[in-house]
Structure formats: structure tokens, C-alpha cells
Image: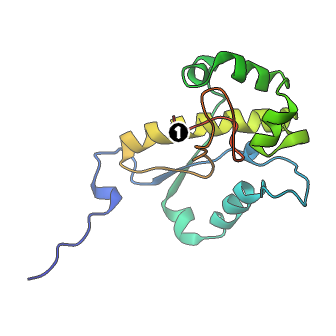
Amino acid sequence: PQKPSPRSWRTMSPSVSRRLPLVYHPHYSCSWPPKHRFPMSKFADLHAFLLTQPSVLATASWHQPELPPHAWVEAVHEREYYRAFLGSRLGDAEARRIGFREQLSRPELIRRTRLEVGGTVLTAKLALRHGLACNLAGGTHHAHAGAGSGFTILNDLA
């Protein structure tokens, strides 16, 4: 017996568009110390690579997230922790646990971290509408309600 062929994501949803939604923001990457263990440029590098792929250009639709409302983040994270992050008031021990130390108070990092949350929410909404969507950042899942950890400041998946 012949195996049924897997259905393409394009046939799984009654989407208006048959293009794969890809979510990206130019601020997903920010200037970063070249010798830092976290490869911040990976988000911009992935975007640049995808733009060189004819099959991606032919089948993708690009979407850009906005900054999420503070209430979204505060529904997951303790308000005190989140506001301390926004105000660059996290202590040395917290910064060390996250892994960004002196970078943690940089406005560019704060913006990109919030955009990543907005991107994950946008990606989920697009996936529900189209059957599949991909965020070129996100998946940061090590943060707890009241603390960041493992290069994760905000848990965008929660």
C-alpha cells in the first residue's frame, strides 16, 4: 500500500495567503561585544541568509512585530522584576544569572527583548490564521516569573 503524502502547510488552513509568514524585526539583533558568549548577531544573520534563498523569497511573507503592552509581560512576570529590568535596576546577581551583566541596562537590549515577546505573540496569531508561522527570534524559555536565567530575560513562550 502506498503511504499518503504529507499535507503541505499550504493546504492545511483556509488562509487567504498561501505564503509562509516569517516574523522578524531589525532590532532583534543589537550591537554586542564581539567576544560575548551569546551570539547576538544570529538573528540578523539568519534574516540575511534567508534573503539569499530564492525559495524563501518566493514563498514567504514578512511580518514585523511591535512592542507588546506591558500588561502582557506583567501577566507572566512579576511586575517588580519586569519594571526593574525596564528601568535598568536589576542587581549584579540577577545580571550574572541572566548572563548579560553590563549589557543588561542597554536600551537596545531592553527594546530587542520586548520585541522578541511581541514577535512570538504575532507568530502564534499568524500560525493560527495560516497553519504555520516562524519567528526568527524567540523561544526564550529559561526566565522565571521573578528572575531571568540562561540568556533569557523575559519568557516569551509563557
Where's residue 34, x and y in %? 90, 59
Residue at 59% across, 17% down: 71
Residue 81 occupies which quadrant of the picture?
top right
- Residue 40 horizontal side relative to residue 76, left or right: right
- Scheme of image coloration: rainbow
Task: Please identify the quadrant where the N terminus is shown.
Answer: bottom left
Closer to us: 103 or 45: 103
- Residue kind at label 1, given as amino acid type: Leu
Position of residue 106 relative to residue 59, above or below, is above
Residue 9 occupies which quadrant of the picture?
bottom left
Task: Name the residue tied to disc 1.
Answer: 157
Residue at 54% across, 20% down: 75
Hey, which residue is sitting farthest left in the picture?
A: 1
- Residue 51 horizontal side relative to residue 92, left or right: left
Hey, which residue is sitting farthest bottom in the picture?
A: 1
- Residue 39 horizontal side relative to residue 148, left or right: right
Where's residue 134, x and y in %? 51, 51
The total of numbered circles placed on residues is 1
Where's residue 141, x and y in %? 58, 43
Closer to us: 59 or 82: 82
Label 1 environment density (alpha carbons within 10 Å; few <14, some 14–19, many ≥20): some
Hey, which residue is sitting farthest front in the picture?
A: 93
Closer to us: 57 or 127: 127
Residue 116 occupies which quadrant of the picture?
top right
Closer to us: 102 or 30: 102
Q: Which secondary structure, mark 1?
A: loop
Position of residue 138 relative to residue 46, above or below, is above
